[in-house]
């Protein structure tokens, strides 16, 4: 009997899930241990159904709404003397944002953002679809960000917020959703830092797709063939 090998991503996701469930179990145990004379004080308050957010090291946190990975709020990159600016990017994801771009299925309300080098960037990522989406940034210094990545994942119809600090380089970073086919179907963007570099390819509304879809018109051929066969 063959055994399937678990990937690193699967093991990380499993660890985060166990950590989150453990945090919830502890919270529920504490509630049950409350004295009865104290617990009645909460009867008039609206129940809070949001599960507690668990942490798993390396700037990672997770709850039922999604997760933030490799968050960095305080560690300034070694090539920055100080934070140049504090900026918040409010970003929305959803099928409706793909409508202006034929051939795409998923979309973002904006596909390019400009910030200063050494900026502290907070991303408020709202997913308006019923399926999960991601906002993943590549190319950050690996001594601060494992794998050079910052990552937000929001489950359907939720919002997640995370923060990272950029180095001093003028650069154009790739942003995308890493769920299978979401980038290929429209969820690709860029973060331009300072002067940046050249625009990335296949950014909806900004650059031409590297591998454009073709939609040949087969209808007219089929109709003419049908007519000729019937005339004969």
Image (spheres, rainbow, N blue to C red):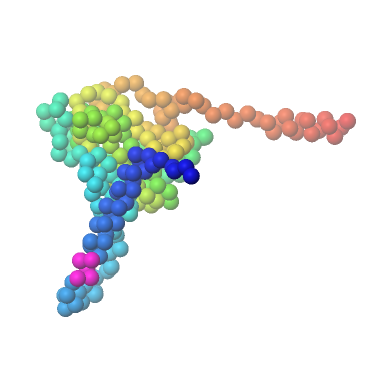
Task: Name the magenta segment's main secondary structure.
Answer: helix
Is residue 32 highlighted in magenta? Answer: yes
Q: Is residue 29 visible?
A: yes
Is residue 82 highlighted in magenta? Answer: no
* Count of numbered circles in the view: 0
Q: Is residue 41 visible?
A: no
- Residue visible at 24% across and 57% down in the picture: 23
- Residue visible at 34% across and 21% down in the picture: 198
Q: Is residue 232 above or below residue 132?
A: above
- Residue visible at 47% across and 42% down in the picture: 2
Find residue 81 and report its horizontal and vertical position in percent. 11, 28
Find residue 147 and report its horizontal and vertical position in percent. 28, 32
- Between 135 and 90, the residue placed more toward the observer is 135
- Residue visible at 40% across and 33% down in the picture: 188
Q: Is residue 79 above or below residue 30?
A: above
Query: Would residue 117 be found to the left or right of residue 228 on screen?
Result: left
Give the residues in magenta: 29-33
Q: Is residue 145 above or below residue 30?
A: above
Q: Based on the displayed image, in which of its 4 quarters is residue 197 positioned? A: top left
Query: Dividing the image into 4 quarters, which one contains the C terminus?
Result: top right
Q: Residue furthest right?
A: 232
Query: Would residue 107 be found to the left or right of residue 152 on screen?
Result: right
């Amino acid at each position: 009997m063959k055994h399937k090998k678990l990937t690193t991503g699967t093991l990380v996701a499993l660890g985060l899930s166990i950590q989150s469930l453990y945090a919830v179990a502890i919270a529920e145990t504490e509630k049950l241990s409350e004295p009865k004379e104290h617990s009645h004080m909460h009867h008039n308050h609206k129940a809070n159904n949001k599960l507690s957010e668990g942490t798993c090291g390396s700037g990672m946190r997770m709850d039922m709404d999604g997760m933030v990975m490799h968050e960095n709020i305080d560690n300034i990159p070694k090539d920055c003397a100080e934070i140049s600016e504090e900026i918040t990017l409010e970003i929305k994801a959803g099928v409706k944002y793909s409508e202006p771009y034929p051939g795409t299925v998923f979309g973002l309300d904006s596909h390019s953002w400009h910030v200063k080098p050494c900026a502290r960037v907070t991303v408020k990522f709202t997913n308006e679809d019923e399926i999960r989406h991601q906002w993943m940034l590549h190319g950050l210094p690996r001594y601060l960000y494992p794998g050079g990545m910052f990552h937000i994942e929001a489950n359907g119809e939720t919002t997640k917020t995370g923060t990272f600090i950029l180095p001093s380089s003028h650069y154009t970073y790739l942003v995308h959703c890493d769920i299978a086919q979401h980038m290929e179907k429209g969820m690709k963007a860029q973060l331009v830092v300072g002067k940046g570099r050249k625009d990335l390819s296949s950014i909806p509304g900004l650059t031409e797709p590297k591998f454009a879809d073709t939609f040949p018109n087969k209808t007219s051929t089929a109709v003419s063939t049908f007519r000729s066969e019937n005339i004969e």
